[in-house]
Amino acid sequence: MQKGKELYRGKAKTVFLTDNPSLLVLEFRNDTSAFDGEKIEQLDRKGEVNNKFNHFIMQQLEAAGVKTQVQSLMSDTESVVKKLDMIPVECVIRNFAAGSLCRRLGVEEGIALSPPTFEFFLKNDALHDPMVNESHITGFNWATEAQIAQMKAISFEVNNVLSPLFAKGGMLLVDFKLEFGIDANNDLILGDEFTPDGCRLWDSETRKKLDKDRFRQGLGSVVESYIEVAQRIGLSL
Ligand code: ADP
Ligand code: UDP
């Protein structure tokens, strides 16, 4: 497999074509962004840490029967993935209130949500990723009703697999964001990434933040915390 030309440069990753039309290379850069790209910094080793973290999590999900984009690690900062036609929505599951939910509903951070909540957001930085409902998604033909049902079911399945994995490492999986796409066989597949950039993880005892909120809130030790999370779930980086 040969890496080809750049297809898309996002805020944190660059996507490359390959000589195999069904495969892409995802390069995880050190760029770290928050507030829809308003705050951007380079953090040493973050690309490598997130690349390996994402690969590890996607493998755990595959082993649990979740269909993912994962193919292979290509280098410290690059992974080979299945090329997907991405659905332009973000799927968010929350086990505890934090972030935009607290701002939107005026609720206190840390309230347990039982059962967990599920939300869709449109991927659009210029509009600050507005929340959308199922009728927007079908009405604008971003996805079908069947695909919506699958995205929801797989998101809850991911929560069922990963919450216990992080719990074993003494952490609460507070919330997370997933993106899905359609492969060449018209199957709905988990794409993009699962890293501490796109989820919230707190120490179960102290509720210390170990995720990208350390960057958003200027708490320091961002990559060091990601490495600690990895170590706690059995991945040494
Ligand atoms: P953003 O676009 O939000 O700035 P990134 O920097 O993470 O985000 O860019 C990665 C881009 O690659 C995203 O737009 C994401 O939807 C897309 N992508 C992720 N996985 C795949 C895949 N398997 N196939 C095609 N596109 C993908
Ligand atoms: N999230 C993400 N990308 C986004 C928006 C949210 O990865 O564009 C993740 C975020 O890291 C958190 C979860 O989705 O783990 C819920 O985010 P929230 O809606 O609370 O928004 P935030 O306040 O984090 O912007």
Image (cartoon, grey):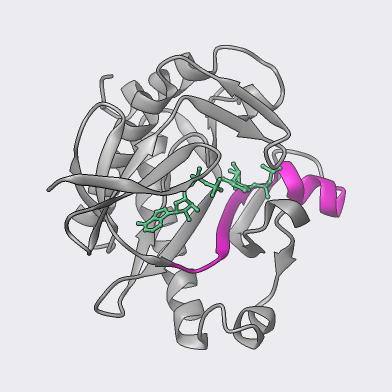
Q: From this view, report whether residue 149 is shown above or below residue 77.
A: below
Residue segment shown in magenta: 86-106
Q: Is residue 40 left or right of residue 24?
A: right
Q: Quadrant of residue 19?
A: bottom left
Q: Is residue 223 left or right of residue 119?
A: left
Q: Residue at 56%, 56% (x, y): give it.
A: 93
Q: Residue at 69%, 42% (x, y): give it.
A: 36
Q: From this view, report whether residue 56 is shown above or below residue 122.
A: above
In depth, the one of 96 and 143 nearer the eye is 143
Q: Residue at 67%, 38% (x, y): give it.
A: 37
In depth, the one of 169 and 178 nearer the eye is 178
Image quarter in which the C terminus is found: top left
The percent position of residue 128, horizontal first and vertical second, equals: 75, 52
Q: From this view, report whether residue 183 is shown above or below residue 233.
A: below
In depth, the one of 184 and 222 nearer the eye is 184
Q: Is residue 188 left or right of residue 88?
A: left
- 98 inside magenta stretch: yes
The percent position of residue 28, horizontal first and vertical second, equals: 39, 34
The percent position of residue 133, horizontal first and vertical second, equals: 69, 75
Q: Residue at 43%, 64% (x, y): give it.
A: 180
Residue 211 visible in image: no
The percent position of residue 97, horizontal first and vertical second, equals: 69, 46
Which residue sits furthest right? 106
Residue 81 visible in image: yes
Which residue sits furthest front? 5
In depth, the one of 117 and 114 nearer the eye is 117
- 104 inside magenta stretch: yes
